[in-house]
Amino acid sequence: MTASSALFLLDALLVALFWPLTAWLSMNGVPPEAWVPQAVILVISNLAFLYALGLYRRDAIIDTGKSLGRIPVTVAISIIVSSLVIGVLSKILSLELVGPQLGRIFAAAMGCFTICALIARIIFRVLRRHPMFHTRLLVIGAGARAWDLLWILRSQGRNLHYDVTFVHDESFGPVDSRLSSDPAIHIVPYSGKLIDIADRFRSDEIVVAPDERRGMALEALITCKTAGYPVLQYMSFLENEVRRIDIKRLDLTWLLFSEGFYSRPIDRVVKRGLDITLSLFILVLTFPFLLIAMLLIWLGDRGSVFYRQKRVTLEGRTFQILKLRTMRMNAESGGAVWAATNDNRIARVGSFLRQSRLDELPQLFNVLSGDMSLVGPRPERPEFVAELTTQLPLYQERHAVKAGLTGWAQVNYPYGASLDDARSKLSYDLYYVKNCNPVFDLLILIQTLRVVIWPGSGAR
């Protein structure tokens, strides 16, 4: 069981234990049929926003203090959204819970959900080192590839703790010095009886990650697989575990024969329907804020409100992206330049517009016109695409789908403007292109709320 799923179950359990009694006490004297539907909506909204605002992410689970500070805000947002949903449904279902009664159940939800979430994270902080939350891995090989695997798992793995045993043979190549120099790391010799080693260490999974694979006996791995041990290649395991594709040690053969990089016609139709429907909904919802932002830009220097720039989308086609102008007029008269921290080209109101993401709203018109999608790799400028294509393998493959207003890289990696940042973001973009579907799009859209609401997510 992963740490995030365990914490979610703990949240759900505490709410299931304490919310019915809390709601009943707060609504004493009111018939159940008048408040039970609202109580259920509040629960669903609470758990959904805990997920959407990142309270089940690895970094939030590790940094308990940050999570505790964000919980009251998250619960308050979920209650505000619930009130809007209840207001709409009350007309459809003819619910009679209004006025002071509605305020009572909202106040009860605020207190109950906040306390439950706080208690859940305190309990989980104590329990998370229990062996039940450890993943026991048997890694074949102890070379540079095995070290990369260990480093990625320690910093980005779905679980907080991995008990890793490395099995090595001279035919796999030299042992990485970073592994051999750490006394806490177990490296055992490959004896040919791999099943005995897997049994001894009670392995949950076997990961094949030698630097040199020609000396590896496949029969031993087949024996382990038939005995019930999942056997995964290095690339497949990392894809499942960190939900990105490792560009540093990319295996083109694996990429060629693995599943993915295909979307059904029905998926494309559903995706386009979601793009149109949600874009119109967001535009209607945010139109007053868009007008205010346009006015502030105009008052700043009486210049153009909108900014158009050539970007690259599906199959390398270029289009004119539409954004609110956040930089000074003629800020790029010298040519295309990546944005930098404390960029002096940004106008006075531009920093706020970027941090709040209001400058991105006009791109919804690009989505409606079909040049972009709501979800996909962020569109890059042709100058940068030409440069990055020569330096990063498979960079052009991110254009196998439409560019997006938000994307898997945007919700997982902070803003960056360097080759290393581009490489890291490409690892997430390739994962999205390989696994894209409408359900995945919805999950990304939900997680985008975290990037919008919490400041300091990397916008420039």
Image (cartoon, rainbow, N blue to C red):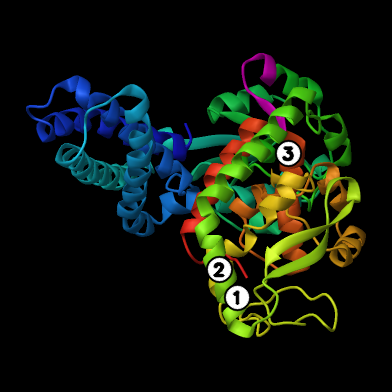
- Give the quadrant of residue 216: top right
Q: Which residues are magenta?
A: 224-235
Callout 1 touching callout 2 (CB < 8 Å): yes
Q: CA distance from mark 1 to mark 2?
A: 6 Å
Residue picked out by circle 3 = 234
Of the two numbered discs 1 and 3 in the rendering, the one whose residue sits closer to the viewer: 1
Which numbered disc, 3 or 2, marks the residue that appears first in the sequence?
3
Residue picked out by circle 1 = 297
Say which of 317 and 216 sits in front.
317
- Give the quadrant of residue 311: bottom right
Residue picked out by circle 2 = 293
Q: Magenta stretch containing residue 459, yes or no?
A: no
Residue 366 at x, y = what percent? 74, 51
Q: Residues within 10 Å of mark 1 (few under 14, many from 20)?
A: many
Say which of 291 and 249 sits in front.
291
Would residue 133 be seen by someone viewing this image from the given angle?
A: yes
Which numbered disc, 1 or 3, marks the residue that appears first in the sequence?
3
Q: What's under tag 2, amino acid-wise?
A: Ala
Would residue 245 be seen by someone viewing this image from the given angle?
A: no
Q: What's under tag 1, amino acid-wise?
A: Ile
Q: Residue at x 48, y 65 (%)?
A: 455
- Residue 358 lies left or right of residue 91; in this view the side is right
Residue 107 at x, y = what percent? 19, 45
